[in-house]
Amino acid sequence: MSEEEKPIVLEEEEEKEEVEEQEEAVEETTEEAPVEEEEPEEEEVHYENAVNKGDFIMVEMTGTAETGEVFDTTSEETAQESGNYDAERTYGPRLVIVGDGYVLRGLDQRLPGISLEDEAEIEVPVEEAFGERNPANVQMIPFRILRSKGVNPVIGAELEIDGRPAIIRSIGSGRVQVDYNHRLAGRKIVYKVKVTEHITNDKKKMYALIGRRFLGIETSEFTLKKTKKKLRIGIPDQIFFGENIQIAKRGVAMDILRYYEDLEEVEFYETIKRS
């Protein structure tokens, strides 16, 4: 063997030894590495004689901006006094399933712990209410473009432009200032909430879910028949031809299947009696 070949053999042996040393080091590191223990899940707090997450509750509530403006209420009287009355709306206690997004997120997160008996005042900060005002959401749009979209801008009007809710702030020089921020953006809000009923009975919960979709109809007019895997709901004859009845029926079915995993289907039926 020539002198030139010997270093090559030595390099291969050295490389082999180096690899073995690295493998041993990895094994030692692996053996010595501490095993990270999973942190136990934080137990959910349970409140006595108070609202808890997942509760079905009926609530009377009124939301007020820091300016004093009432923007949301379940009270017909308060709506009339504040100038927000809507003749097409049904007023009265509202179903809230706590933690499931039935109300504004900032309010929903603060419901657990409030009394089941006394009125509570809940303050929701700007970032958890309607967010901060974003200057980029205020735009100048040529008047002719809005007119071409069928929009007749009037200062202060709240309307929809290209599928986005907007407020007309000013009009001048052939251009219109359009504000896409929520009208309550940048404002802290306060809700006064009173629980009128804590629903624990399954049948009453189902009726409450029905009432949420079929507004203005006495839920006692509906008939419920539950078998092992199916719930049959009898529709009262006064709403056979009601507007959007199919949408309401589907909404009820999806709600009930969501909260009752033992059910596989919801069936609606109509009964016509001899007059």
Image: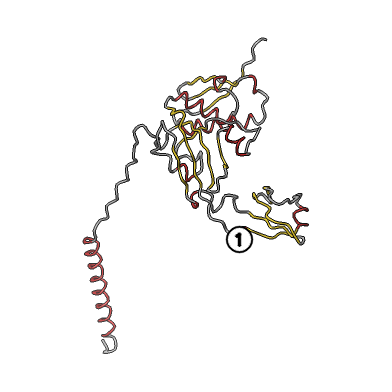
Residue shown at 64% from the left, 49% from the top: 165
Q: Name the outermost residue toward the bottom.
A: 3
The local crowd at label 1, few if under 14, some if 14 to 19, many if 20 or more residues have their Cα within 10 Å, is few
Residue shown at 53% from the left, 22% from the top: 232
- Displayed quadrant of residue 133: bottom right
Q: Which quadrant of the rendered structure holds the C terminus?
A: top right
Residue 218, how many percent across, how many down? 57, 22
Decide which of 229, 246 is in the foreground and name it. Answer: 246
Location of residue 30 with respect to 37 vertically, above or below: below
Decide which of 58, 81 is in the foreground and name it. Answer: 81
Decide which of 93, 156 is in the foreground and name it. Answer: 156
**Residue at label 1?**
136
For residue 74, side relative to residue 195 (left or right): right
Location of residue 124 with respect to 117 vertically, above or below: below
- Displayed quadrant of residue 241: top right
Please name the amino acid that badge 1 sits on. Answer: Ala
Residue 249, how many percent across, how many down? 59, 29
